[in-house]
Image (cartoon, coloured by chain):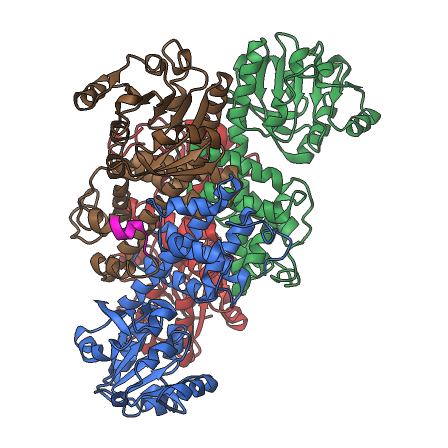
Chain colours: A green, B red, C blue, D brown
C-alpha cells in the first residue's frame, strides 16, 4: 500500500484527506496555516509535518489541493520544498483547480527528478468530498494513473482520464466556465422577466420543464437565489479564476469564443465588485443591481444607491 | 363544450390539433397550404374551412399556431379575416412563439370586438405535442384562461399563468434564448477541449456529472452533435427569432444583458450562414468551423473548403 | 421668404433659433418650459406662442428640436397640437436626434394632412450651433429639402441629403455610436496602460500621432479626461439613447454588429450608474472604477467604495 | 559613433535600416532569407553577416525588427546566436511590435550578460519608415535610451520614453487594438447604413465632419474600402497578433475590457477566414459578408458563394 502525504486542508481538501486516513497509508499532512492541521489530527489519525519537505519524505504519493497552480509550483523548491526530499518514482497528484500551462511546467520540473505528475482537479463540492464521491479529472500518463488509482478511489467515485498533463485542468475550467455562463445568463433572463411581470418562481418552474434548463436553473436559483440564502460554498474569486483559465485555453487554442471571453470579463467585474468572500452565486447580485430588479423577491435590496454590498 | 377552430398545421400544430378532434369540439381547421389540411382530415375527424373567416364562424375558441406573431396579426382583417366572423365573447388562443408587443396589439384589436386573447406559446417539442404533454405559458386575463383551460388541457400537461398579455411570449423567448446560449457556449468549450486533446465524449461525461451541465450538454450534444445526426426538429431560423425577441425584451426593460445580446448576434450569424432549413443544433457547426475542430468526430467536415486548419 | 416657427429651445435649439430671427421669417417660438421662451425673447426678436397649435398658424416651416422623436410625435395631436393649425403645404423639419421608425410614423401622419416632413438631426455641438456652422443630415424628399434649404442654411454649413425619411436619424445615430465606442474603447486601453506604468499623456501623445487616433483621443481625452474637467456639454443619457437607436438599426437591417450591440449595453450601464445629469465623456469613470485606475491622474477618485457619484 | 547591426529586413525594417547606413555606423545586416540581404546591399552600403552571432561582433547596438517577440528570443542562444558574440555594455533595441512578457524575459537574459535592452516598436508605416519619420515607443531604462537616442533619431522623428521594459510593446499594442476596433466598428455602422439606403460616401462625409470620426474613417475607408483598393500594406495576421497582445495586457492588469476582448475575438475570426496574406483593412470584408452589403459599392462580392442575401 502506498504511503501518502496530503497538502492543503481547505474546504474540499480536508474531507478528501479524511478518506485517506487508513493505517496502510501512514497519512502525513501539511497546511500553511498550522491551526487547520491541528484541527484535522484532532479528529483523524494522521501526522503533521513541519514543512512540505518533511511531509514528502518516503512518500509514494503526495497529493496537493490548493487555490491555484502557482501555489503548488511554489512548494517545489528551497530547503523546505518538496523536491528536497520527494523520492524518485513517487507521484505528485495535484487536485488543485489549476491551469494547464503551470501544470506542464511543474510536470517538467518533476520529471527532471524522476517524479511523476498528474493534474487531478475534482468536482462534486464539499458534499461530494465528504461522501468520497468526487469526480476526478486526470491529465497525465495513463500508466502513472493506474499506479495511484486505488488511492484516488478513496475519495473519487469517477476517475476520468482526459489526456496529457493539463487536460484535467482544462476540462475542469471549461465545466466551471459553463457554470458561470449559465448563472449569469439565467440571471439576465430572470431579471428581464421580473420587470416584465413574470415572477421568478413561475419562470423557473417553466424553464426547468423546458429546453433552457441547466444545473443553475434547476438547483442554484431555486435553492439560493429565490430564497436569498446565498450560502457561501464556493468562492466567486475562485470561479473568476476558473473562467479566466477556460478563456485563456480557448485563446491559446485559437478557438473564437465570444461567449466564454465575455463571461470571463463579467465575472472579473463581479469579483471586483463583490470582493473576496462572496459566493459564486452572488454574481447574480450584480445583474440584479444593473437591471434594477430582484429575482423572486421584493425590491428591498435592488436599489442602485442603497449600496451594493 | 366549446366549439373550436385550429389554424396552423405545422410540425407542432398538427399533433396539437389532433388532440382537439373530439365530437363536442366540432373541430374546424384552416391552413395556408391546403395540402396539409387535406392530409390532416385524412386521418382525423375535422372539417376544413376555406378561410380564417370561415373557420371562425360560431367558434368559442380559435387557436393559432404560426411562425411569428405578425402572421397571426395578418389573419385578423379583410373579408376573409377572423374579425369578419368571430363572435363577441369568443377567445383567440395564440400558441405561436410570438413577441409581446405584437400580442398586445392583437389583444387590443380583439378587445374592440369583445373578443378575448391569450398568448399561449408551448414547450415540449414534437414529442410533447404528440403525447399531449406540452407546457403552455399563458399571458392574459386569468378569468379568460379559466374559460378555455379544459380545451388547453387536451394538449397541455402544465398550463402556467405567467401574467398579463405578452408574458407567455416573453417567458418562452427567454427559455429559448437560454437554450441558444447553452448550445453555443458548450460548443465553444468543447471545441477548445477537442483541440487541447480532450475527446468530447469524455468531456461531456464529466460535465454532465458536474456543475456545468444543461439540457444541451445532457441531451443535445450526446444525441445529435457527437453522433453528427443533427435531426431537423426545430429550425435555427425560429430559434434566431426567439433569441431576438428575448434580447429585445431585455433592452425594452433596460436590463443590461451582454450575454443575451451577444447570443442574439451569434445566432443571427449562424442563421445567415446555415440558411433557412438548418436545425437549431447545427449552430455548433459555425463554432466548429471558426475553431477548426469537430466536436467528437474526425475532422472531415470542419473546414469550409479544405482550408484553414 | 418663409414664415418660421421653432419649437424646443434647449442647449442646441436656442442658438439655432437665434439664427432664424430675421424679420422676414416672422419667427414664432414655443417651449414647454415657458421661462426659456421668455429668456429667448429677452435677447432675440421673436414672438412666444401659447401652444404648438398657436405656433404653427400660418407657418410655412415648423422646426422642432427635442430630446427624442416621441416628444415630437406627442406634439401632433389634440386641440393644442400642430395638426390643429398647420397649413397644407407646410413642412415640419425635425432636428431632433431621433429614430427612423418614429420619424416614418410622423411623416405618414403629416402626409395625411398634406404636410411635408424631413428628419434633420444636426452635429457640431453648442459651438457649431452658435456659429451657424452645423452639419444637417436630411432624410426625406429631395424636392421638399430644396424648398426649405435657405432656412436650414441659416444655422447649417453643410446640408447633406442622406436618403428617405429616417436616414438622417440613422446616420446621426451611427456617428454617435462610433463616438461612444471610441470613448469606451480608448478608456479601456488607457486604464490598462496606466496600470502597466504608461502615463495617459504619453499614451495619448503617441496614439494621436498613430493609427489608433480618433476624435475622442485627439480632443475629448486631452481636454476633458486627463484634466478631469468633464464639462457638461452633451448628456450621457442622450448618447445612451443614440447608441440604442444605432444598435436597433443594425438589428432591423440584420447586420451582425457585436461591437455596436456591446457598446449599447455598456452605455446603458454607464447611464444607469452615473445618472441623468452626467456628461457623455464621464462614461470613462465607469471604466476607471471597474479597472481600478484613473486616466492621467492620481488615484484619488478611483476607489470602489468611495462612492461613484 | 556607435557601430550598428540590423536584423530583420522586412517591409518596415528595410527602409529603417537604410537610414542607418552611414560610414560611422559600419552597418552590418542579417536576414533569415538571404536574398533580401543581397537586395539591400545592392543599393545601400552595408555588410552582410552570415549569422546573428557574426552580425553582433563588436557592435555597440543591435537593432531587431521581426514579426513577433519570440522570433527575437530565438535569436539569442546557440553558437550562431547573439549572446555568443554580443559585447558587454552593448544594447539590443527591439523594434518588433512585441509583447511585454517576452520582452521582459529577453531583457533578463541579456542583463545576465551585461547587455542592455529596449523594446522600441514603431508607428508610421512604410511611408514613415522611408521618410525617417517614425514614432518610436521605448520601454526600458532611460539612461540606456539616452545612449542610443542618436541612432534611433536616424529613422525616428519622435522618440517617446513610455516606462519600464515592455511598456513600448504595450502602448503599440493598444494603439493597434484601437485601430482594429475602429475599422470593425465603422464597418458595422456603414454596412447597416448602406442597407438602410445611406451611401457610404455620404455617411463618411458626415462622420468625418462629426464626433464619430477616426483615422480609420478619415483615411482607410475613403482610400481603401470605398475604392475597393485594399492595398496590402500591413498584414491582418499581424494586427490580429497585436490586438491579442492588447487584450492579454488588459487581462493581466485586471482591467475589465469587453470591447477590447471582443475585438480580439473578431480579428481572430477575420484572420482565420481571410488567411495570412490579407491586409488588415480587409477585415471589413467579413463584416460585409455577414451583413450582406458592400460598403460604397455594388453587391458583386458580398456573398461568399452566391448565397445568403
Position of B26 with respect to A34 (left or right) is left
Q: Nearer the viewer, residue C125 or A94?
A: C125
Residue sitting at x 68%, y 31%: A12
Position of B272 with respect to D92 (left or right) is left
Residue B118's x, y, as percent? 46, 68
In this rendering, is residue B232 above or below B97?
A: above
Residue sitting at x 38%, y 53%: C218
Q: Quadrant of the N terminus of chain C?
A: bottom left
Q: Quadrant of the C terminus of chain C?
A: bottom right
Q: Dividing the picture into quarters, in which one does residue C141 lie? A: bottom left
Q: Dividing the picture into quarters, in which one does residue D247 lie? A: top left
Q: Dividing the picture into quarters, in which one does residue D296 lie? A: bottom left
Q: Nearer the viewer, residue B203 or D284?
A: D284
**Outermost residue toward the right?**
A42
Q: Nearer the viewer, residue D56 or C262?
A: D56
Residue B143 sits inside the magenta stretch: no
Residue C68's x, y, as percent? 40, 72
In this rendering, is residue C116 above or below C261?
A: below
Residue D13's x, y, as percent? 28, 29
**What span is in magenta?**
D213-219
Residue A17's x, y, as percent? 72, 24
Residue sitting at x 41%, y 67%: B101
| Residue B275 visible in the displayed image | no
Q: Main secondary structure of the magenta part?
A: helix
| Residue D81 visible in the displayed image | yes
Amino acid at each position: 500500500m502506498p504511503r501518502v502525504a496530503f497538502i492543503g486542508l481547505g474546504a474540499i481538501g480536508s474531507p478528501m484527506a479524511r478518506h485517506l486516513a487508513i493505517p496502510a497509508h501512514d497519512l502525513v499532512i501539511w497546511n500553511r496555516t498550522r491551526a487547520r492541521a491541528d484541527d484535522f489530527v484532532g479528529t483523524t489519525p494522521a501526522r503533521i509535518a513541519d514543512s512540505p519537505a518533511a511531509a514528502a519524505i518516503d512518500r509514494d504519493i503526495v497529493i496537493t489541493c490548493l487555490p491555484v497552480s502557482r501555489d503548488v509550483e511554489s512548494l517545489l523548491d528551497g530547503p523546505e520544498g518538496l523536491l528536497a526530499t520527494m523520492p524518485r518514482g513517487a507521484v505528485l497528484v495535484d487536485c488543485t483547480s489549476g491551469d494547464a500551462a503551470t501544470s506542464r511546467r511543474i510536470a517538467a520540473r518533476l520529471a527532471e527528478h524522476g517524479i511523476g505528475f498528474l493534474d487531478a482537479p475534482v468536482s462534486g463540492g464539499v458534499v461530494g468530498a465528504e461522501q468520497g464521491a468526487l469526480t476526478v479529472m486526470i491529465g497525465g500518463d495513463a500508466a502513472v494513473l493506474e499506479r495511484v488509482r486505488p488511492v484516488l478511489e478513496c475519495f473519487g467515485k469517477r476517475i476520468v482520464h482526459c489526456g496529457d498533463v493539463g487536460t484535467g485542468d482544462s476540462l475542469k475550467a471549461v465545466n466551471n466556465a459553463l457554470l458561470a455562463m449559465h448563472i449569469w445568463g439565467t440571471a439576465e433572463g430572470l431579471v428581464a422577466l421580473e420587470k416584465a411581470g413574470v415572477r421568478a418562481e413561475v419562470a423557473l418552474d417553466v424553464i426547468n420543464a423546458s429546453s433552457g434548463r441547466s444545473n443553475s436553473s434547476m438547483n442554484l436559483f431555486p435553492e439560493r437565489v429565490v430564497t436569498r440564502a446565498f450560502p457561501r460554498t464556493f468562492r466567486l474569486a475562485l470561479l473568476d479564476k476558473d473562467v479566466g483559465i477556460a478563456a485563456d485555453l480557448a485563446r491559446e487554442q485559437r478557438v473564437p469564443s465570444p461567449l466564454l471571453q465575455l463571461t470571463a470579463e463579467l465575472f472579473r467585474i463581479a469579483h471586483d465588485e463583490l470582493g473576496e468572500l462572496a459566493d459564486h452565486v452572488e454574481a447574480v447580485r450584480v445583474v440584479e443591481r444593473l437591471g434594477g430588479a430582484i429575482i423572486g423577491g421584493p425590491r428591498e435590496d435592488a436599489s442602485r444607491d442603497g449600496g451594493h454590498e
